[in-house]
Amino acid sequence: MKKVFERPKSLTDVHFTYCAGCTHGMIHRMVAETIDELKIQDRTIGVSPVGCSVFAYEFFNFDMVAASHGRAPAVATGLKRSLPECIIFTYQGDGDLAAIGTAEIVHAATRGENITVIFVNNAIYGMTGGQMAPTTLIGQKTETTPFGRDARAHGYPIRIAEMLATLEGSSYIVRTSTHNPQNVRKTKLAVKKAFENQLNNKNFNLVEILSTCPSNWGLDSIQSLKWLEENMIPYFPLGEFKNI
Amino acid sequence: MAKITVEQERCKGCGICIAFCPKKVIQLSKNLNPKGFFPAELINEKECTGCAICALMCPDVAIEVYRQEREKK
């Protein structure tokens, strides 16, 4: 029989350190497959964040740099400007990109840096134990909002894709999800487009991917996918916000 | 004819492949793997169509899919 689906070559054999059912692994696969398909493994440099995906440099089979918390877009800017022939991407979670790294991402986008950003949004701080993140939904219970997030006390969840789409420097801003096979395929296409744009010397590209956190949401893997669909998508609508 | 293989050591038994399998031919094994999870396994090779939805949704990239090649006429 012919093998029709296998691990991409841009992933190492190291087992993922993510919890059972966490969609980080799917997103890793899609990034690795895209790099295989575009045949750019030998000139790709990824920037890993701080958060659950901090060990991304163990899982991806190409050069990686580990940035300090939230600084991945700044490190990527330096890499791209000094090595313009390389393909530079950052892989960041919502605690990294939307909280401590907001200044870096906004200014990387407004400068129109020719990089690709994979932004994984699961509405919670995962690695540190389930605290409220800037993307936590109103009413969502976390370790630091045990009665649910209250807008008067904690403010409103931030919509990064919409915000960055208003900036002149961004060229491709899209939000996708991983809650069912159809949306996983759409995510793959968006990731591929974000890398192709970089190859075509367009400006800043960001793919926001809605993801799950079964451990900290207190749900099993299937319930988490359902929770994502029912609660996150109404607040974080899917679609392309900018494509020029 | 098609089949999947689940890398038993890599699988964390999250059950996403089982929930999305359109033919319902995957189940959790009764044996623990070295990580302490019950990994997924194919139970009915005859029914598997090799659609690869399980592999697409697998968060640990533990599934490989094989399909019979069509004979050229």
Image: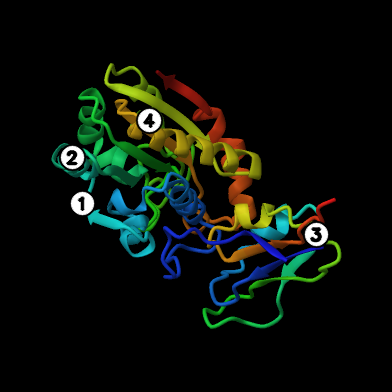
Distance, label 2 to label 3, CA atoms, is: 47 Å
Distance, label 4 to label 2, CA atoms, is: 19 Å
State the image quarter where residue A61 is shown.
bottom left
**Residue A35 drawn at (x, y percent):** 42, 48
Q: Chain of mark 3?
A: B
Q: Secondary structure at mark 3?
A: loop
Task: State if disc 3 and disc 2 touch (CB < 8 Å).
Answer: no
Instruction: Between residue A25 and residue A212, name the one nearer to us.
Output: A25
Task: State if disc 1 and disc 4 touch (CB < 8 Å).
Answer: no
Residue positioned 13% across, 41% down in the render: A82
- Which residue is disc 2 drawn over? A74
Distance, label 1 to label 2, CA atoms, is: 9 Å
Same-chain status of marks 1 and 2: yes
- Which residue is disc 4 drawn over? A197
Task: State if disc 2 and disc 4 touch (CB < 8 Å).
Answer: no
**Residue A62 drawn at (x, y percent):** 32, 58
